[in-house]
Image (cartoon, rainbow, N blue to C red):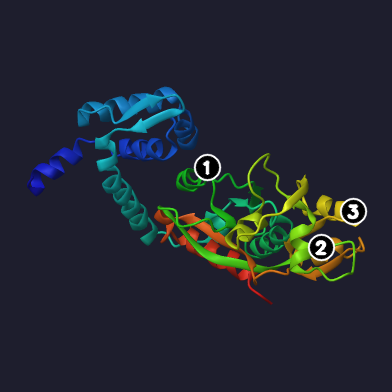
Amino acid sequence: MNKINYQSRLARFDLNLFRVFATVYREGNLTRAADRLALSQSAISHALSRMRERMADPLFVREAQGVVPTPLAHRLWPGIRDGLDMLGQAMMQGDHFEPTRDIAKLRLAINDKAEPGLLPLLVSALHAQIPGLVIESVRVERDTLKSDLAAGRLGFAIDVFHGTIEGLSSSLLFKDEWVVVARSASPVTRKNYLLATHAIVSSRQTGRAVDDIELSRQGVSRKIGARCQTYESASRLVAQSDMLLTMPRGLAESINAHLGNKIHRLPLSQSELRLHLFWHTEREHDPATRWLRSVLTAAIAPR
């Protein structure tokens, strides 16, 4: 296609349709896309209808949980995504990024076991830069993490690293030593650890606790006596029982200082809790994303 015909076709095409397409593609749901764009669902449907007519393809097919892209929609997506990103970057060239003006609200998904230790540091650092910033901390939902970051429902996530996820970027944010909390001051040997009954911490009804993920890499399994929602409640349980609790040292020292529990070295191969900061790769070069990453990383950096 020559340049004149290309420009002629583009001049007759409503570029707002690309924005609707991109939002529906990311959300996979017309209702959420409408909420995201502050439009009615009928307006979203009308925009899609116009684009379907132009492209001679359904673009999105309904399913039980929303809509799925057709093969043509998948082929169109990289070009539309990159084109919208280039337009956004072009607009930024004439409008200098100013954090206090351009960032009013930030939603973070933080691993709920790490939130008590990390959130105060993050809020303090962010409010030092943007006093009026509204900060929301929500639970990490790993099944929807990628789509939540892509759609902008989340700005960042802080969680353990479970492996590379296409479309997500990450960097190591924080690490801490795993320790064993016990009522007794007697040394915790490997044999004692493996024979003991353990309290574990997870707010999820099923699935492995965070420390189980690391221990499983070492081929270690334990007898579980209690499953608690917080390290605070688990530590109180340990204080009145013979169960052991494995948790990060920083939290162990702050929570157990007033409970009388003893903190022991984990009698296994050296291991650490390693938390990563996650963001969507499409926002890699976004000025706000880059600025927030630097603030969040500096807030948790060792002092």
Rendering coords of residue 216 (x, y %)? 61, 57
Q: Which badge, 1 or 2, is on the more N-terminal residue?
A: 1
What separation in Å lies between label 2 and label 3 (alpha carbons)? 11 Å
Residue 143: mark: 1
Mark 2–mark 3 CB contact (< 8 Å):
no
Q: Within 10 Å of the Cα at label 2, are there few (<14), some (14-19), or many (20+) other Cα atoms? A: many
Residue 11: mark: none
Q: Is residue 275 visible?
A: yes
**Numbered disc 2: secondary structure:** strand
Indicate whether 196 appears above or below 154. below
Residue 241: mark: 3
Indicate whether 82 appears above or below 24. below
Residue mark closest to the camera, 1 vs 2: 2
**Numbered disc 1: secondary structure:** loop
* 4 to the left or right of 97: left
Q: Amino acid at mark 2?
A: Val
Mark 1–mark 3 CB contact (< 8 Å):
no
Residue 181: mark: 2
What residue is rendered at 67% in x and 59% in y? Answer: 131
Rendering coords of residue 290 (x, y %)? 48, 63
